[in-house]
Image (cartoon, grey):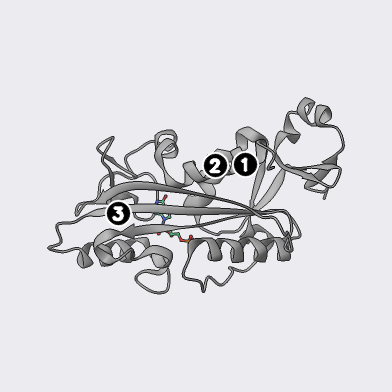
């Protein structure tokens, strides 16, 4: 397998290679580091679908960690950023490739930010969107304050011991409704209403969800850091 990372000493050569635009991790020493393939440190089908669509136009192949036989990382932390770092390091260590991790969740104001980092397993094991959503709606029964936001932290590690991981975040504000709408998206999307559009995350086509979503915003922030060549 060819290396997923190539280091080029000439920025001109990088610009002339459409596929190698990929992710430029900036200069490490004299070399320009380019990624054209990375591991997505997740087995979540919804996330995988969204990242493949976000990164394909940049010529970046997204490999699910399950394709490489990498087990799921522990997510013991109370913050999204710590969990995202743990997942990216774990995937880079096992797969010996750059890794992108997303730790995300829905934070509900009336529930003091729950389910938050526990969103994927809110209703316990095994993970179930159906049971998670049922638990959330039950917890909000009779509650007038339905404000919620999705949060996403992305971490890109060049390798497991990367001392300078790239970290970006995004948020999407909305409210939780009682009756599910739409069949797109994943997770809590059918119950998450984007007030600006009047549509749920599951009703918005991918491109529109991406314009507003926590993940889309975090991805754009990550790319800005990379293409801006961090000072
Ligand atoms: P993680 O894999 O531990 O980061 O858990 C993320 C969980 O948050 C998912 O399993 C969903 O339950 C929820 N989540 C994150 N992003 C979204 C989204 O864009 N739509 C719906 N649910 C999401």
Give how far across and how far down residue 36 sits, in percent: 72, 42
Can you identify the residue that label 1 sits on? 225
Residue found 66% across the figure and 41% down from its top = 226
Closer to us: 223 or 5: 223
Please tell me how crowded label 3 is: few (under 14), some (14-19), or many (20+) other residues with Cα within 10 Å. Answer: many
Quarter of the figure with residue 220: top right
Figure disc tally:
3
Of pointers 2 and 3, the one earlier in the residue sequence: 3
Residue furthest left as drawn: 142
Q: Are marks 2 and 1 in contact (CB under 8 Å)?
A: yes
Q: Are marks 3 and 1 in contact (CB under 8 Å)?
A: no
Local secondary structure at mark 3: strand
Report if the beta carbon of the residue with label 3 is closer than 8 angstroms to ligand 1: no
Please tell me how crowded label 2 is: few (under 14), some (14-19), or many (20+) other residues with Cα within 10 Å. Answer: some
In this picture, is 74 found above or below 65?
below
Checking the image for residue 221, the label placed there is: 2
Residue found 15% across the figure and 61% down from its top = 143
Give how far across and how far down residue 192 sits, in percent: 29, 49
Local secondary structure at mark 2: helix
Closer to us: 145 or 123: 145
Residue found 69% across the figure and 60% down from its top = 68
Give how far across and how far down residue 42 sits, in percent: 56, 59
Q: Is residue 162 left or right of residue 87?
A: right
Q: Is residue 69 left or right of residue 2?
A: left
Of pointers 3 and 1, the one earlier in the residue sequence: 3
Checking the image for residue 148, the label placed there is: 3
Q: Quadrant of the C terminus?
A: top right
Closer to us: 146 or 123: 146
Quarter of the figure with residue 208: top left
Separation of residues labelled 2 and 3 (CA atoms): 22 Å
């Amino acid at each position: 397998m060819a290396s997923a990372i190539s280091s080029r000493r000439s920025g001109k050569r990088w610009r002339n290679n459409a596929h190698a635009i990929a992710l430029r991790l900036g200069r490490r020493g004299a070399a320009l580091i380019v990624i054209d393939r990375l591991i997505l440190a997740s087995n979540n089908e919804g996330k995988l679908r969204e990242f493949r669509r976000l990164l394909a136009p940049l010529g970046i192949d997204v490999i699910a960690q399950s394709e490489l036989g990498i087990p799921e990382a522990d997510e013991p932390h109370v913050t999204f950023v710590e969990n995202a770092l743990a997942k990216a390091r774990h995937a880079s260590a096992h797969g010996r490739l750059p890794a992108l991790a997303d730790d995300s969740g829905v934070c509900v104001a009336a529930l003091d930010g729950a389910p938050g980092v526990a969103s994927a397993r809110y209703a316990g094991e095994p993970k179930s969107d159906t049971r998670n959503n049922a638990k959330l709606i039950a917890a909000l029964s009779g509650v007038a304050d339905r404000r919620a936001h999705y949060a996403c932290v992305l971490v890109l590690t060049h390798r497991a011991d990367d001392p300078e991981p790239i970290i970006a975040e995004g948020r999407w504000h909305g409210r939780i409704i009682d009756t599910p709408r739409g069949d797109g998206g994943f997770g809590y999307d059918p119950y998450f209403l984007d007030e600006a559009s009047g549509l749920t995350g599951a009703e918005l086509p991918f491109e529109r969800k991406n314009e507003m979503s926590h993940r889309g915003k975090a991805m754009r922030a990550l790319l800005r850091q990379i293409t801006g060549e961090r000072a």
